[in-house]
Image (cartoon, rainbow, N blue to C red):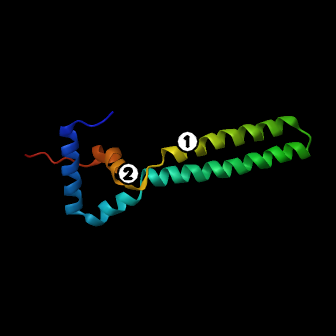
Amino acid sequence: MPLSEHEQRMLEQMERALYAEDPKFATALEGSGLRTYTRRRVYQAVAGFLVGIALLMAGMVAQQIWISVVGFLVMLGCAVLAVTGWRKAPKPGEQQQAVAARGWWRLPVRRPG
């Protein structure tokens, strides 16, 4: 669900205030977030895929079909996770927008009074 114009202006105002108050923290937020999460997810899926290959081979060596089937299913599931994680990864220019859109509600709001 996209933000309304008013919400977008408020978000931009909060971002500017964050950069003005603590530029080091704001810069640290840019480097983490969605991109790191998706990269980690893809790496985990690749590792799981390799485990699936090992199970598939172990099932063939032990002549246990069910182990091979489990290995194949692990490989298939991890391949799906890797592809969806790769597609969801933000482009380099979208990184700041993705972090801002994901975390705008976490910023403290100071109310007068």
Dot 1 crowding, Cα within 10 Å, few <14, some 14–19, many 20+: some
State whether residue 67 is above or below residue 19: above
Which residue occupies the foreground of this view, 88 or 64?
88
Question: x and y percent of residue 111 in the render?
Answer: 13, 45
The answer to whether residue 46 is left or right of residue 8 is right
The amino acid type found where label 2 is placed reads Glu
Going by the picture, which residue comes out furthest to the top?
1
The amino acid type found where label 1 is placed reads Thr
Q: Which residue is mark 1?
A: 84
The answer to whether residue 48 is left or right of residue 111 is right
Dot 2 crowding, Cα within 10 Å, few <14, some 14–19, many 20+: few
At a point 20% along the width and 38% down the height, the residue shown is 5
The answer to whether residue 22 is left or right of residue 68 is left
At a point 46% along the width and 53% down the height, the residue shown is 35
> How far apart are the alpha carbons under marks 2 and 1?
17 Å
State whether residue 10 is above or below residue 20: above
Q: Which residue is mark 2?
A: 94
Q: Earlier in the sequence, mark 2 or mark 1?
A: 1
For the N terminus, the image quarter is top left
State whether residue 4 is above or below residue 52: above
Tag 2–tag 1 contact (CB < 8 Å): no
Q: Secondary structure at mark 1?
A: helix
The circle drawn on residue 33 is none
Question: x and y percent of residue 58 in the render?
Answer: 85, 47
Question: x and y percent of residue 26 in the render?
Answer: 30, 60
Q: Secondary structure at mark 2?
A: helix
Question: x and y percent of residue 113 in the render?
Answer: 7, 46
The answer to whether residue 16 is left or right of residue 94 is left
At a point 31% along the width and 49% down the height, the residue shown is 100
Picture quadrant where residue 77 is located: top right
